[in-house]
Image (tube, coloured by chain):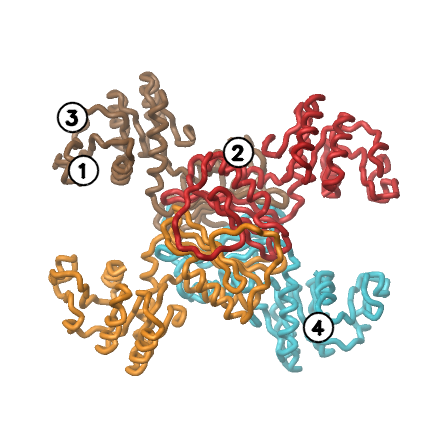
Chain colours: A cyan, B orange, C brown, D red
Amino acid sequence: MGQKAVSMVDQSKDMKLVAGFNPSVTDLNPQTYGLNEDVKIYNELTDINVVADIWIDFSIPSAVFENTKFAIEHDIRPIIGTSGMSEEQTDELKRLADNKNLGGIIASNFGLSAVLMMKFAQVAAKYFAESEIVEKHHEDKIDAPSGTALNTARLIYEARGHDQKQHSSKDPLDTRGGDYHGIKIHALRLPGFVADEEVIFGGVGETLTISQSTTDRESFMTGVKLAIHEVMKSNHLVIGLEQII
Amino acid sequence: MGQKAVSMVDQSKDMKLVAGFNPSVTDLNPQTYGLNEDVKIYNELTDINVVADIWIDFSIPSAVFENTKFAIEHDIRPIIGTSGMSEEQTDELKRLADNKNLGGIIASNFGLSAVLMMKFAQVAAKYFAESEIVEKHHEDKIDAPSGTALNTARLIYEARGHDQKQHSSKDPLDTRGGDYHGIKIHALRLPGFVADEEVIFGGVGETLTISQSTTDRESFMTGVKLAIHEVMKSNHLVIGLEQII
Amino acid sequence: MGQKAVSMVDQSKDMKLVAGFNPSVTDLNPQTYGLNEDVKIYNELTDINVVADIWIDFSIPSAVFENTKFAIEHDIRPIIGTSGMSEEQTDELKRLADNKNLGGIIASNFGLSAVLMMKFAQVAAKYFAESEIVEKHHEDKIDAPSGTALNTARLIYEARGHDQKQHSSKDPLDTRGGDYHGIKIHALRLPGFVADEEVIFGGVGETLTISQSTTDRESFMTGVKLAIHEVMKSNHLVIGLEQII
Amino acid sequence: MGQKAVSMVDQSKDMKLVAGFNPSVTDLNPQTYGLNEDVKIYNELTDINVVADIWIDFSIPSAVFENTKFAIEHDIRPIIGTSGMSEEQTDELKRLADNKNLGGIIASNFGLSAVLMMKFAQVAAKYFAESEIVEKHHEDKIDAPSGTALNTARLIYEARGHDQKQHSSKDPLDTRGGDYHGIKIHALRLPGFVADEEVIFGGVGETLTISQSTTDRESFMTGVKLAIHEVMKSNHLVIGLEQII
């Protein structure tokens, strides 16, 4: 993700890479990494000493909080794609950024199609009393159902404010997936898929399906680029890409 | 559609059928039509003399304007599903209703899934530069592409404000469908379909698809019911179900 | 189904309805039922005394065995769509028909798309080691997963000859569906669906999906018509439409 | 494709890479290319002097004919994935291989899902009188409709033996795609797709859809591997992966 972000910045006419930070490198020559000679490379957080608008972070859970705090303290707007921070940590970062009127975003999913799917599902939930979710991922995905699917179900439930009605049927068996307040989530794990999800709403004589398919994780960079532009215009930190689209 | 509307009203606890109007019948006994004895049947517009909240009209293009005008003049909120009125006619009806602070709706499509699909497509159009539409209808549908597909393309175009970029490809052939400001519409006509449409947005490494499927035209009644409740709370006439959802 | 069969026969140039049998009617006048005056109506099995090529039976489980036996004994080729007979009963009927060199068919599903789907799934199973099934039915369907889905899974398993490999994933939850020798079946129950099924095969970098959708149960008549023509050319009774296509 | 083939051979327990041929390299040290030291590297066809069972060729149209001829003359079974040879050339190669009882295959598509889709479409064509094809490719694909889609349409047409019936509809517009003897092909070009195709058959009240999706071209290697095993058991050269599955 870090490399994809660097490529994205390079290819954007209105952006310029000023520095990179990686605590595990020893060679601080940018050209070693195929970067312009005026890009600064750091391996120590406290050494960082550049003026920048945006801090993009797709690092690891154990580092992201300190990184983001450092960015905010140095007036650099954070775009954070690393998940794993506690609610207390994100709350504190939000408070720090908001106090400085600094824009920023922390999001677990920068995929535009996934975020729009969730937004639309929230709206459709008000008009259709019943829905189910089918998510399809590669066979090596460890958890089932996926976090995005569970999040979609949660948004549908919250939009309705009550559990989905259950049909009494003879179904002694069950399969991989989940049930969130009556919203069934079906989890497929097969080679050939990257990350797909469909949310199906059923009404009398009609169905409405909102689905997204990921064929390459480079898709996240579209969301990051969008976030950069929004964060430059904002003066507070938001949680979730859905807050700015 | 008229019959489906009668069934829908009958099955709704908060609604009551008070009268029916059909200029082609001579028998004015409601029981001939399986209706309660206290339902009035009329075959002459000017004979209608009932107090009612709602006028549901799925009649024919040549009659709908006069019908709706009559309804508005008698303070009955119109729910109009007949298409074919001119813009001048709908404008006049809107003016008449608005002057009386009377709620009402004229819509060519009362299918909730289709209307939500169009609303979502409008939003997605802002985030994805490229989209195509595939619509699948039964083999006897006369026009291609469908009115709903063309309408979807128009909404996408308006949300973007410019033509969709064309890819230069070798495609000497072509097929059933259309092209609306660069948005390709693919029209399938096969037995086994009733009326389906999917709008596909493509971005780097991801696609977002909003699709709706109609298996029974009774689906329109969900939209009519919704419109009835909204129109009772409104004091002007709207064009299109999307205006109230 | 009986009525749909009558319509199908009426509309087929190479077929003629000669008689109808319904033990619950008392009026034996064919015109009461909108039939030609030369069609015989019977309400007693043993009264039936016509020369016919084909016996179409979509009656009830308790009657179908005796009906079919009667048909075979009178040299009328049976087309049986009623499910619920025991294996012993179908075996006996098969023996009776085969002894007389009489064509016939007993099938639980006359839907061509469903039967072809199952045939194709059997073939694909040899080339793809992993597959899952998603079936979508109306909310009032009592059993889950559907009989056709279970049958598809059984055919896939038999084509492979061994259980499907399981991925070790964290999936503490589960949802409506089933698992047949490692083949996961996902069962959706939502209004708006009639009867849909998709079988998904996944391999490295690719997926193959075979899906069928039923929008009107009249689809069964295409299979019945096909069966009639095949049965006229055959001299034994088969179990399952897949045996003749 | 060449590199993917090398990886596939390396990861297969029953295969061993003995040599590589690339006329544009000058360094003949296998370790330069990350290969074992006992792998021979050639840049001149006539220098090749190894005993091998299989010749895998994903080279360029101008070289493939001579390469394959060389392989056959040296008793190496050819697996050819390069397209662009003339019918005369493939005929001659087939004759050469068949005369030596040497197995081999020339195929434009080694994707199992695509080849099975075409096989199934051929069968379904006999039972459904009407079908349309929708193919979805990335925006940079030059030709439309795709070769695989046209090939699918051709197979459907040949299975039926006559043109597909046309519906008279008002469709003054058209869109990207094609029409093969009445079979409409719809070609979508959008970022986010790699290579997808669906073949839809429609009958009264039902549809049957066979679809395949490619998310990574590595999928071709499954077909190459399968071909290697089949070719070892065969004594003639076949055209098309569908001939051996």
* Residue D63 sits in quarter: top right
Q: Secondary structure at mark 4?
A: loop
Dot 1: chain letter: C
Residue beneath disc 4: A14
Residue beneath disc 3: C47
Please tell me how crowded label 2 is: few (under 14), some (14-19), or many (20+) other residues with Cα within 10 Å: some
- The type of residue carrying mark 2 is Val
In percent of width and height, residue B79 lies at 29, 69
Same chain check for tags 3 and 4: no
In percent of width and height, residue D231 lies at 67, 28
Q: CA distance from mark 2 to mark 3?
A: 47 Å
* Residue D230 sits in quarter: top right
Position of B160 with respect to D78 (left or right) is left
Residue beneath disc 2: C123
- Picture layout, residue A134 above or below residue B234: above
Dot 2: chain letter: C
